[in-house]
Image (spheres, grey):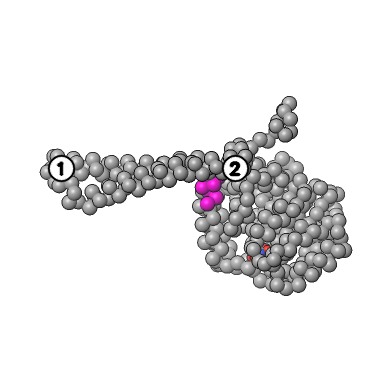
Amino acid sequence: MNLSLVIPVFNEQDNLPLLFEALYPTMNSLGKTWEAIFVDDGSRDNSLSILKEYAEKDPEHVRVVSFRRNFGQTAAIAAGLDYSEGEIIILLDADMQNDPEDIPMLLAKLDEGYDLVSGWRKNRKDDALTRNFPSMLANKLISWVTGVELHDYGCTLKAYRRPVLEGFRLYGEMHRFIPVFANSVGARITEVVVNHHPRRFGKTKYGLERTAKVILDLFTVKFLVSYSSKPIYLFGGAGGLLMIISAIIMGYLFFRRIFLLIGVTGSPLFQTSVMFFILGFQSMLMGLIAELLVRTYHESQRKPTYTVRTKINLDEND
Ligand code: UDP
Ligand code: MG
């Protein structure tokens, strides 16, 4: 199997026929073997029965996974990835806001030697105030914090080589952070401008609150990719800093006591110094506990702390 499309579907009954109509000419023109995995995320309209119809008509290409209830777009994407078999995976929304005609362009970019090609909705057709503007800020923040510079993390339309999708699980709203995880396993990443259309049928499932979730997820992602194999660097670093500040304050208090004869315990600086010392010490201990957890994490899954691109004169399974 060359190519898997993974498409999350939640209440998109009116968009699905349009999607199939657009998908077939594009996919058949590629001359590759392909499958389209539709993950029905607990839709409460006719989406599932429409998908069933298409799956019966074309069992060679159309596959359907249906959830018992709505688990969210990220879970739907994770399931689609689990069931997919292609060497290349393309994620796509079911609502026709993404354009299936962009798929050949993404594939051409992969052929240039990239492992991940991200779509960029340069002319995004969503609500400016509640979606586009917060999303622009979020993209800047994510790029700065993670060091993976992309204009549009939120665009579902992206193409991936399978190896860069392995080795991590998706939680919360984290599908948008796949490029960050991929970067941490050494993926070569680029982006291309893709089409974006306003929603014609149904309505968006998201609003301003999602930006808040994305920012919270960013904390987790940053911690996972930068410190999950060395948490003591973070906790110990923070703890050490607090203890240094504590020591400076204490030094100043003793200086005043000795040379200016001002009492040490009367000043609120004294309490501050003691508090910083305790916090710093606690943080170091947390770092040590986190180090233990990391070891159980890696060793219970026999997960190496590195990823290999190629091997020469070595067995594939070694
Ligand atoms: N979706 C899903 N589960 C959800 C919410 C959304 O599978 O709980 C799907 C939805 O059907 C669509 C895609 O995820 O195919 C993107 O959703 P939406 O268009 O609402 O997001 P937006 O484009 O407004 O960011
Ligand atoms: Mg949409």
Q: Mark 1 points at which residue?
A: 257
Residue lying furthest top: 313
Evaluate if marks 2 and 1 touch, with contact meaning CB atoms under 8 Å apart. no
Residue occupying the point 22% across, 42% down: 252
Q: Is residue 214 above or below residue 287?
A: below
Mark 2 and mark 1 lie on one chain; the one further toward the N terminus is 1
Q: Name the residue under label 2.
A: 300
Q: What element carries label 2?
A: helix
In this view of the protein, which residue sits in the foreground, 206 or 71? 71
Ligand 1 within 8 Å, label 1 CB: no
Residues packed near mark 2 inside 10 Å, few (<14), some (14 to 19) or many (20 plus): few
Question: Is residue 222 rendered magenta in the image?
Answer: yes
In this view of the protein, which residue sits in the foreground, 115 or 274? 274
Residue occupying the point 87% across, 63% down: 57
Which tag is nearer the camera, tag 2 or tag 1?
A: 2
Numbered range of the magenta stretch: 220-226
Which amino acid, by three-letter code, is at mark 1?
Arg
Residue occupying the point 54% across, 60% down: 213
Which amino acid, by three-letter code, is at mark 2?
Ser
Q: Distance between the residues labelled 2 and 1?
A: 54 Å
Q: Is the magenta stretch mostly helix, strand or loop?
A: helix
Q: In this view, does 86 lie above or below 207?
A: above
Count the marks: 2
Q: Can residue 25 be seen in this view?
A: no
